Amino acid sequence: GSDRGGKVKLIAATQLDSKSAFAEGFREFKKVVEKESDGTVTVEVHTNGDLGGNEDELVQNLQSGSVDLVVASPGFMAQAVKEVDFFALPYLFESRDHWKKAVDGEVGHTVTKMVEQKTDFKILGYWSAGVRNYYGFQPIEEPEDLKGIKIRSQDSPTVRDAWKALGAQPTSVAWNEMYQALQNQVVDAAENDFTNIYQASHHETAKYISLTQHDYTTRLFFTSQQTFDALDEKQQQAFMKAAKAATEAARKADDQLAEESKQKLKKAGVKINKVDTQPFVEKTEPVREKAVQQLGMEALYQKVQELK
Amino acid sequence: MKRWIDRLEWIQLRMAAGFFLLFIGCVILQVASRYLPGVTVLWAPEVATYAFIWTIFMGAAIMVRRQEHFRFDMLVNRLKGRSQLVARIVIHMTILAFGFVLFGDGTTLTQQFWAWSLNSLPQVKQGYVWLAIPVSGITMMIYAIANIRDDIHDYKRKEGELTP
Amino acid sequence: MMEGLLLIGLFVLLLLLGVPIAFVIGIVAYVGIVMIGNIPVTTMVQSMFAGLDSFVLLAVPLFILAANLMNQGEISERLIRFAIMLVGHIRGGLAQANIVVSMFFGGISGSSTADTAGVGKILIPSMVKEKYSKETAVAVTASSSTMGMIIPPSIPMVIYGSLVSVSVGKMFLAGIVPGLALGLGLMILVWFFAHRHEYPRHDRVKVKKVLAEGVKSLPPLFTPVIIIGGIMGGFVTPTEAAILACIYAFLLSFLVYRSIRLRDLPEILFDTLKLSSLTLIALSTATALGRLISYYNVPQKVGVFFDTFFPYPWLFLLAVILLFLFVGMYMDTVPAIILFVPIVLPTATAFGIDPIHFGIVIMLCLAVGLITPPYGLCLLLASSIAKLSVGRSFRALIPYLLVILFIILLVAYIPSIAMWIPDTFGNASQ
Ligand code: NA
Ligand code: NA
């Protein structure tokens, strides 16, 4: 930032590459904000982690002011506001539409307000990183198929508890060591969205993807209050307009990437099977309830349920 | 004063070793949790990493006292007497300045992230991790000053000869 | 532009003055960030923290610890004895054994300097006693110890892997064949010299006796099996392999050979953490400098430079080889990786060069820097053990250096040499 209303240069940073949905969103933001502010606000987009290689660091950088725009998983924002972890609950949403209704409606609005109250962060939009599915050496159809399966899961206590509740044995492996772990069957399975599975070539060894759809992922696109306050009124309007356009663009790019990856996976001979998610939802209900209680988010959870 | 500095270094070295042992323990736990059924220790890698960060920051400060950091000393070693003393004091002052930045900015960052929590252990505050930086910075400053004092002392006592 | 020149000037000035490299890098990063003006000054310190915040880096002190536990007394001597029995009867036997033992050590320790210090202390005096020239003793010891950072485990590879976000495990696997090729190349060279200069040979040892000694030396040689086997089999990540190596080394030295006692442990621990801090605090400040370089968009500019002047992959590779040979002469391996890899990597990726293959080529080039003046640590160590001037040591080293350069070209232009094992046991297209 600089003095309020002068020329402002914003720095947007992501750990992902320039072809990612996040980078696409940032570019849209840049285009719109530069046009709408008559060039008084400019944006520099940094990709490939050159200003911070992981979300942890990007969020910290935003806090200290060395970057202005980032996208992060709820888990990383949870370093500062634990309630945000709510969005990472398995089977919180039943479909993309359900997700959209929630994050673009009252639920999203409430969380945005909560974050603004507790931190100096300002959520600008809810982005996504695909729908996460189970993949492994065998397809699964019901929770019983997960019995004793060693699955690499995300490092969140709730996510782990959910897999345990389903009978699986969650374990932690660094993402870039996963290919070998699968190849040597140190783990039996993992879970991720189509794009990540394809890009890491995990389908070369784990040939079955089962559509468990346990996580319609939410990513938070946000800035800091400090950055926002440094803009004059007209610039702020341009900024918010750009944020909206960026959110649209990023979501579209994410859907597109996922679809492309899905087709490429199919072409590579990966077997994708549908799963009746109802029993999975039921078995993980106690985990969600416990987590919701710990986070103090009972009311919001109720709201999400009602949107189904 | 020398006794105090030695004492400080003694404590800091043991602190560093303590953190080293802690991270060794956590990595062992991490391996165990992979292969022993029933053992799941989600926080082991994260705690190990933070103990490691403490180890390195403490170790880096200790090496200031021992003057064993990697450096090009070809030129300084060629200098003699007073000019060598001056050069060495300039080096110590540069380290002192760096220690000051670590201490100052480290304190700011520690405050900034004090209330944040660890990803895998939400009950632990991030402040405890960031604290390694200002602690390292202030001890670096103390050691740099002690080194200046030692060099001047040496120079006076040995009439211009400095211990390498 | 002005800022750039000012920062480079400051860098050179502080470096020549003798300020520790880690601090020079940190101060330059700090001043650069202050000069940008609109980003917080705390960014430097924050990036230092971020540079260390990575689980895979824990492998660095752990591998140093494993080597320190092993190096204590008996084990080095036993390996040397076994190597002499294996190849001592060839003409120039002790020189050949020097190379073989460095291969063994390469599989145990993650750095080359540890090998020069450990093996050189014993073998340089014995070679001189057997009437090898001091020059030969130094040249063989220093050149063969470069294998230490090529044969896994390797600390520079851990640094490269964590910096570039490629699997450190795969880097290790890719180092196996080039490392062994290096050893073989040096052995062939020594074989030629041995016949020309009539180097001495030892009596042939009965196969039975070799086997008996082999069995006794087997336990320490099992360390590389744990590390490479564990990683190849996918049972452990490099950090976990490192801890297994530590536990194994501890049990071996403490229970089997009884070469260390419990009261030796604190000293070993202190030595390890001090040595690791030196390397890693430099990595930490270099991360901050990397951020600064990104804020100035230097990587893109360098990319344009490479695209313009080295438009073909083979030409680009050659430029990178020359760059790292040059950088390695003046800098320590780790800071060289940290400073220069991020600059050339984007172009390499754009040319479709596999980052693992690319990394191995860089490792080999930097290994050369360990045996060239002015800042070749292995050369300096070996010549100081032999009490021979650095100039004469280096002249003797030149033929060995040519062998290493030949291996570099082979590995650079025939990628499958390095990539065969990781492609077979790892993911080809990460
Ligand atoms: Na090695
Ligand atoms: Na050797």
Image: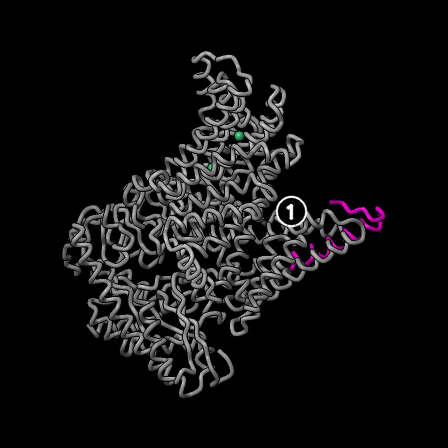
**Does residue A60 appear in this view?**
yes
Task: Answer with the quarter of the image where residue A215 lies.
Answer: bottom left
* Residue at x 49% of width, y 62% of height: C293
Q: Secondary structure at mark 1?
A: loop
Residue C138 appears left or right of A240: right
Label 1 environment density (alpha carbons within 10 Å; few <14, some 14–19, many ≥20): some
Q: Quadrant of residue A219?
A: bottom left
In the displayed structure, does residue A19 sit left or right of residue C45? Answer: left
Residue marked by disc 1: B68
Res A57 visible: no
Q: How is the image coloured?
A: one colour
Counting from the top left corner in percent of width and height, residue C427 is at: 30, 45
Looking at the picture, which amino acid does disc 1 mark? Glu
Residue A148 pos. (x, y %): 25, 45
Question: Does residue C429 appear left or right of residue C376 in this picture?
Answer: left
Q: In what quadrant of the picture does the N terminus of chain C appear?
A: bottom right
- Residue at the image point whose x is 38% and y is 45% from the top: C357
Q: Is residue B36 positioned above or below C102 on the image?
A: below
Q: Position of residue C231 (x, y in %)?
A: 37, 40
Is residue B155 inside the magenta stretch? yes
Which of the two residues, B139 or B17, is positioned nearer the viewer here? B139
Label 1 is found on which chain of the structure?
B
**Span of residues in magenta:** B138-164
Find residue C3 and report its horizontal and vertical position in percent: 57, 68
Location of residue C102 with respect to A245 vertically, above or below: above
Q: Is residue C25 above or below residue C105?
A: below
Is A58 inside the magenta-drawn segment? no
* Mark 1 close to ligand 1, CB under 8 Å: no
